[in-house]
Every structure is written in structure tokens, then in C-alpha cells.
Image: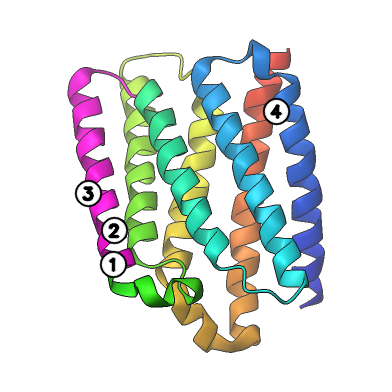
């Protein structure tokens, strides 16, 4: 429990620094990096509010759904901008709508208890689509000897989306594990998100050089 509390505060401090670092280079960044920075920052503020609510012992699970909406719009837009070829973009659009359909079905089935639900199949489907986009972007650019302009942002998405999709597939079942069972899973999620932030920082550092 001590490790989890320490990691939580370290994560928040590091996240704060990365948001500041990202905006200091915002004007010099290319459009996909700007989109990623906006998403990165919005998610930071939502997580900050969520933490405040948790400290005040107020139910904060509705913030998860706001984060889901931001990720759905923001990361899909990011990949729409960097994925090659019209056919690929058409497939990406289809996958996006498939993920949205699963999310909407899950919301419909759980609407009256939404404040107690997070994760689930919709979030899993969304993250898996990002993993697919990440791998496709990586493989396509390597096979075609391209520059991989946004490689570190792509690595960030691959690591965090891949890991958190499995974690949050458990969704509200995490609550049945008790605090002792939840902590190791939550620690893994924090570590994955820290790696996500490190790769974001590397991408921003490239701009500042």
C-alpha cells in the first residue's frame, strides 16, 4: 500500500511536469503532436479532479467516462492524421465505429448504474483498436523505410493501450478483489502510464533540439 501511495504522488508530479514540458514546445510541434498534447493535457486535468474527489470521499467513477470520451475522440484523430493511405484510413474509420458501437451498447445496458461502472468491453475494444493502429503504423513505416516521425508517441500508445486494455477489461470486477487484490493491478497501470509519459517526453525533446 505504501508503494502504491508513493507511486500515485510521483506519477501526478511527473505528469504535471510533462504537461508543462509539452506546452512549452506546442507552437513548434506538428499537428499530430499538437493533438496528442491536447489529449495528454485534458486527461491530466480529469485525473487531477478525480484524485481530488477521491480524497474528499466523493464517487469519482464518472470521470472515467469523461476520460473515455476524450481518448475516443483525441487518439482516433491522432491516428487518423498519421496513418497512411485512404484505404487504411477507411479501415481505421470502420474500426472506430465498431468500438463506438460496443461502447454505446455497454452504456445502454449499464446506464442506470453508470456511476459505479468503469472499464469493460467498450474500453477494451477501444484500446485494442489503438494497439492495431500502433502496430500497423510501425510495420508500415519500417517496411517502406519511412522516417517514423511520431515513433515515440506511437510507442507510448502501444505500451499503455496494450497493457491497460487487459487491466480494465476486468472493469467493475476490480471492486470484488478488495483493496489487497486491487493494489498490484493499479501499480502496474501506474507504471505503464509512466512509460507512456516518458515516451511522450522523448518525442517533445526531439522538437526542442
State which tag comes first along the sequence, 3 or 2: 3
**Closer mark to the observer between disc 3 and disc 2:** 2
**Residue in the image at 59% along x and 54% along y:** 192
Residue 77 horizontal side relative to residue 181, left or right: left
**Residue in the image at 54% along x and 31% along y:** 36
Residue 113 horizontal side relative to residue 62, left or right: left
Within 10 angstroms of label 2, few (less than 14), some, or many (20 or more) residues? some
**Circle count:** 4
Q: Does the segment drawn in magenta span residue 58? A: no
Q: Residue furthest front?
A: 112
Q: CA distance from mark 2 to mark 1?
A: 6 Å
Toward the viewer: 16 or 148? 16
**Closer mark to the observer between disc 4 and disc 2:** 2
Q: Does the segment drawn in magenta span residue 100? A: yes
Determine which of the numbered discs, if any, sits on residue 98 in the image.
Answer: 3
Circles 2 and 1: CB atoms closer than 8 Å: yes
Question: Split into 4 quadrants, where in the image is the C terminus?
Answer: top right
Measuring from the top left, give residue 153's x and y in whole percent.
Answer: 54, 32
Measuring from the top left, give residue 207's x and y in whole percent.
Answer: 66, 15
Residue 172 horizontal side relative to residue 60, left or right: left
SS label for mark 4: helix
Q: Which residue is mark 4?
A: 22
Amino acid at each position: 500500500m505504501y508503494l502504491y501511495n508513493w507511486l500515485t504522488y510521483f506519477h501526478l508530479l511527473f505528469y504535471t511536469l510533462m504537461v508543462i514540458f509539452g506546452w512549452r514546445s506546442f507552437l513548434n510541434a506538428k499537428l499530430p503532436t499538437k493533438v496528442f498534447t491536447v489529449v495528454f493535457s485534458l486527461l491530466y486535468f480529469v485525473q487531477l479532479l478525480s484524485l481530488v474527489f477521491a480524497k474528499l470521499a466523493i464517487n469519482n467513477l464518472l470521470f472515467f467516462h469523461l476520460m473515455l470520451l476524450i481518448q475516443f475522440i483525441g487518439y482516433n484523430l491522432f491516428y487518423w492524421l498519421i496513418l497512411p493511405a485512404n484505404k487504411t484510413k477507411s479501415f481505421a474509420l470502420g474500426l472506430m465505429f465498431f468500438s463506438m458501437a460496443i461502447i454505446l451498447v455497454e452504456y445502454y445496458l449499464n446506464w442506470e448504474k453508470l456511476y459505479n461502472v468503469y472499464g469493460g468491453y467498450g474500453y477494451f475494444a477501444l484500446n485494442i483498436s489503438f494497439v492495431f493502429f500502433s502496430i500497423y503504423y510501425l510495420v508500415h513505416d519500417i517496411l517502406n523505410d519511412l522516417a517514423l516521425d511520431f515513433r515515440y508517441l506511437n510507442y507510448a500508445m502501444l505500451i499503455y493501450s496494450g497493457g491497460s486494455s487487459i487491466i480494465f477489461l476486468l472493469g467493475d470486477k476490480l471492486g470484488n478483489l478488495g483493496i489487497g487484490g486491487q493494489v498490484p493491478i493499479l501499480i502496474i497501470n501506474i507504471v505503464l502510464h509512466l512509460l507512456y509519459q516518458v515516451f511522450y517526453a522523448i518525442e517533445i525533446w526531439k522538437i526542442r533540439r
